[in-house]
Amino acid sequence: MKNIKFKDLKRKYQLLLNEAEKAASKAYAPYSRFQVGAALLTQKGLIIGGANVENASYGLCICAERAALINANTQGERRFKALAMIARGGADGKKIISPCGACRQMLFEFSENSGIDLEILMSNFNKSKIVIAKISELLPLAYGPNDLGIKI
């Protein structure tokens, strides 16, 4: 994992984080008021976003990272280079957020299918704190398709 400043990010990663920020503005978060946006960078160079969607039955909520994966999948995109995420709410947006366990598992599977160790950019809302980590760092000893002998 490494800390990095926005100005020091690769231009494509700056765009990716900006798209995650735009996606956060579309979050449906009437209960928590915690708006999360995510954006995936495909191996083709496309950027596909997603936002969290809450529900009165909390177990039915979907995180921004999984929403981005679902959006990408519906566009036929399943191979990725990176994901950026950003959130507004919580501790006044001063802390970075990281993917929950369910999102880490789903990101790992698509990372394994992509043949790369997916980079995850995690940012606070004003982009003054950014951490980049590989999915393998966020989910060590992960279990995925290769463990089942499946190549997708």
Image: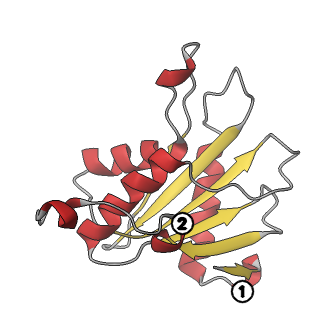
Q: Is residue 74 visible?
A: yes
Name the residue: 56% across, 48% down: 100
Q: Residue furthest front?
A: 141
* Left or right of residue 101, residue 145 in this image: left
**How busy is the neighbourhood of tag 1: few (under 14 within 10 Å), some, or many (20 plus)?**
few
Amino acid type, callout 1 = Asp
Q: Nearer the viewer, residue 19 or 125?
A: 125
* Left or right of residue 70, residue 133 in this image: right
Q: Quadrant of residue 146?
A: bottom left
Q: Nearer the viewer, residue 67 or 116?
A: 116
Q: Quadrant of the C terminus?
A: bottom left
Amino acid type, callout 2 = Leu
Q: Quadrant of the N terminus?
A: bottom right
Q: Nearer the viewer, residue 134 or 44?
A: 134
> Mark 2 or mark 1: which comes first in sequence?
1
Q: Quick one: SS at disc 1?
A: helix
* Left or right of residue 110, residue 149 in this image: left
Residue 111's x, y, as percent?
A: 34, 67
**How busy is the neighbourhood of tag 2: few (under 14 within 10 Å), some, or many (20 plus)?**
some
Q: Nearer the viewer, residue 84 or 107?
A: 107
Query: Residue beneath label 2, please?
Result: 138
Residue 133's x, y, as percent?
A: 58, 74
Describe the colour scheme in one phrase.
Answer: secondary structure
Q: Quick one: SS at disc 2?
A: helix
Front disc: 2 or 1: 2
In the rendered structure, find residue 120 and report the number of the disc placed on it: none
Q: Quadrant of residue 20?
A: bottom right
Query: Residue beneath label 1, please?
Result: 8
